[in-house]
């Protein structure tokens, strides 16, 4: 289904059906280690909380990546064809992409985002600020679909995947996702991707346990969403936010830990929690430059250029689909 939200934004609604959401949640909570995919963080409220996280002093990722993009914008533009089709999976507020819009001047921008309301508002703001840009916004779960709502066969396709979102996926799943992106952009297409680097554990732990409690609120909102959307009865004050670095796997892990023995109902399904039992809500893998480029090569991408900040906290890679 598609509709126009204003004169220059074409909106396509491929949002997953509520029963699909429920089925995936029930499957995850039925595992021995209860899990909920981090993609479910991003309802309207969760998306706004994440925007706040990006402004936190402890959360170095966003400002560091933005600095890399700004300082190397001209060099990035040299890698990319003029009037390309720019695709952004997980577009969120479409803030970082503005750095690219000002330099590479794509003819078409395709944001892909699972939060319908967030997508509409950000796409409309972007269209107002860039009236020359053709915007095709798709509400879709980009982790399960590689179908684009719009295509132009004569223009190079470039995917922009910032924020180190690739780190949320197990390495095998990350390869599958990169293969999906490769099929979106096609042979000769490009991928500009942000990847968080391995670093001191203290810096990582602080970034995911901010002193203001915003990251904890982001985690708790996941339970609040299930209460609202799936008629669950989670008691938020009976769970603790916990984030720590797992050295074995080289990743940050976020959990919601039950403070007591309790039973939670989702519709007619009951889930038993013992005291100290957790719901694993997110991984954030950290890679060395060589580790990530090896991963990307397994998905059919060849590295063309890599940029880092002076402290080597974060990396941005330009890859080409071979």
Image (cartoon, helix red, strand yellow):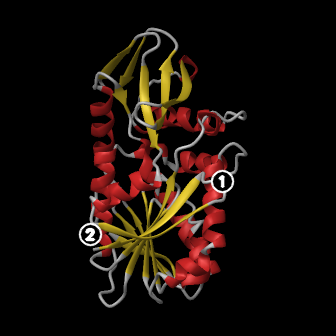
- In the image, residue 208 lies at what x, y percent? 59, 37
Using the image, determine if residue 250 lies above or below residue 75. Answer: above
- In the image, residue 243 lies at what x, y percent? 54, 30
**Picture quarter containing residue 189?**
bottom left
Query: Which residue is the site of mark 2?
Result: 183
Q: Secondary structure at mark 1?
A: loop
Badge 2 local density, few (<14 within 10 Å), some, or many (20+)?
Answer: some
Is residue 89 rendered to the left or right of residue 310?
left
- Give the Cα distance between marks 1 and 2: 34 Å
Looking at the image, which residue is at 29% across and 24% down?
Answer: 268
Tell which residue pokes out farthest to the front in this image: 290
State which tag comes first along the sequence, 1 or 2. Answer: 2
Q: Number of numbered discs present?
A: 2
The answer to whether any part of residue 148 appears in the image is no
The label nearer to you, 1 versus 2, is 1
Q: Residue 234 or 36: which is nearer the viewer?
A: 36
Q: Secondary structure at mark 2?
A: helix
Image quadrant holding the N terminus, namely: bottom left
Looking at the image, which residue is at 29% across and 23% down?
Answer: 269
Badge 1 local density, few (<14 within 10 Å), some, or many (20+)?
Answer: few
Using the image, determine if residue 19 lies above or below residue 271. Answer: below
Query: Which residue is the site of mark 1?
Result: 311
The answer to whether any part of residue 322 appears in the image is yes
Image quadrant holding the C terminus, namely: bottom left
**Picture quarter containing residue 121?**
bottom right
- In the image, residue 166 lies at what x, y percent? 42, 52
């Amino acid at each position: 289904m598609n509709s126009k939200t204003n004169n220059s934004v074409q909106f396509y609604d491929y949002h997953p059906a509520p029963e699909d959401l429920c089925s995936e949640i029930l499957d995850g909570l039925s595992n021995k280690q209860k899990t909920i995919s981090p993609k479910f963080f991003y309802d309207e409220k969760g998306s706004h909380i994440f925007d706040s996280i990006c402004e936190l002093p402890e959360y170095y990722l966003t400002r560091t990546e933005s600095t890399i993009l700004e300082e190397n914008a001209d060099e990035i533009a040299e890698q990319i064809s003029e009037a390309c089709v720019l695709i952004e999976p997980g577009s969120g507020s479409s803030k970082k992409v503005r750095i690219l819009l000002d330099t590479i001047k794509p003819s078409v921008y395709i944001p892909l985002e699972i939060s319908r309301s967030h997508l509409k508002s950000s796409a409309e703001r972007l269209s107002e600020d860039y009236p020359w840009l053709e915007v095709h916004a798709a509400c879709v779960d980009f982790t399960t679909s590689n179908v684009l709502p719009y295509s132009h066969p004569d223009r190079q396709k470039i995917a922009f995947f910032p924020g180190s979102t690739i780190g949320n996926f197990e390495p095998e799943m990350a390869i599958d996702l990169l293969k999906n992106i490769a099929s979106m952009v096609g042979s000769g297409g490009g991928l500009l991707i942000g990847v968080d680097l391995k670093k001191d554990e203290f810096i990582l732990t602080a970034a995911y346990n901010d002193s203001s409690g915003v990251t904890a609120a982001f985690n708790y909102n996941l339970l609040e969403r299930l209460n609202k959307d799936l008629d669950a009865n989670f008691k938020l004050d009976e769970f603790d936010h916990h984030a720590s670095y797992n050295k074995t796997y080289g990743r940050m892990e976020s959990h919601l830990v039950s403070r007591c023995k309790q039973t939670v109902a989702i519709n007619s399904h009951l889930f038993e929690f013992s005291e100290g039992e957790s719901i694993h809500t997110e991984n954030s893998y950290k890679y060395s430059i060589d580790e990530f480029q090896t991963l990307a090569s397994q998905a059919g991408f060849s590295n063309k250029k890599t940029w880092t900040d002076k402290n080597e906290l974060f990396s941005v890679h330009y890859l080409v689909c071979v």
